[in-house]
Image (spheres, rainbow, N blue to C red):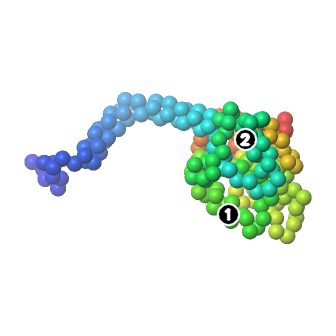
Amino acid sequence: MVDDGQNYSVFNSRMLVDTVGNITDEALKATKIKDVIGVLVGRIFNWSQRKSLFPLHLGIKCCALEMAAAGASRFDAERFAVFFRSSPRQCDVLLVNGPITKKFADPIVRLWEQMPEPKWCIAMGECAISGGPYFQSYNVLEGVDTVIPVDVYIPGCPPRPEALIDGFDKLRQKIIRIGTLPEDNMPEASKPIIIGDD
């Protein structure tokens, strides 16, 4: 009998789970079922990710009124499975809708870093895209893409709620195309999408 330092006479649920997990893991690897399960779970995760987008409820300036109108009863973004959340830890879309000053750049980056992977960013309005009327101002950044990566651009001053809903649809199409990979594994073909650019 080999003494490996384990006391098998005492029931340890953690040890049992580890042992059963190792045995089933080896069996799944040997039969290639683990690869099939991985592909199926990946597809289900991709489907659920694109069918329920949770943008951060963050209003910076006048585009926030159009964001609120998109979520209100007339345009009802919830019927397209867009649910605004107030905590960055529950969101997967950062919707930037106003000018980003140099003082506000650090909080935006902090919100971005608090969001779990996979995450996306939508720049809504001219202020978030290029600085808008504050272009080349002493304290306004020339677009949010100078501090965080942007996936979808929605031009307009301010863009209509229909354009915002169309932006979420374009983001869904991008998620279908590239999948829900973390930011460091993104393919080179994942260029930003510009609404209205046909």
Mark 2: secondary structure: helix
Q: Nearer the viewer, mark 1 or mark 2?
A: 2
Q: In screen coordinates, is 101 left or right of 50?
A: right
Tell me, for residue 71, which label it has, or none. 2
Position of residue 25 measured from the top left corner of the image (x, y, whole percent):
35, 38
Proximity of marks 1 and 2: CB atoms separated by less than 8 Å? no
Whole-angstrom CA distance, mark 1 to mark 2, is 24 Å
Mark 1: secondary structure: helix
Among all residues in the image, which is located at the extreme front? Answer: 73
Position of residue 3 measured from the top left corner of the image (x, y, whole percent):
13, 53
Q: Which residue is mark 1?
A: 107
- Image quarter where the C terminus lies is top right
Please tell me whether residue 57 is drawn above or below residue 198 in the rendered image: below
Position of residue 178 measured from the top left corner of the image (x, y, whole percent):
64, 38
Based on the displayed image, in which of its 4 quarters is residue 45 positioned?
A: top right
- Residue 175 appearing in the image: no
User: In the image, what residue type sits under mark 2?
Assistant: Gly
- Residue 127 appearing in the image: yes
Of 136 and 30, the residue lying toward us: 136
Quick one: label 1 or label 2, which is nearer the N terminus? 2
Q: Residue, x 32% and y 41% (percent of image)?
A: 21
Of 92 and 194, the residue lying toward us: 92
Q: Residue, x 67% and y 39% (percent of image)?
A: 82
Based on the displayed image, in which of its 4 quarters is residue 189 positioned?
A: top right
Based on the displayed image, in which of its 4 quarters is residue 144 positioned?
A: bottom right
User: In the image, what residue type sits under mark 1?
Assistant: Pro
Disc 1 packing (10 Å; few <14; some 14–19; many ≥20):
few
Please tell me whether residue 46 is drawn above or below residue 66 in the rendered image: above
Q: Residue, x 54% and y 32% (percent of image)?
A: 44
Of 130 and 188, the residue lying toward us: 130
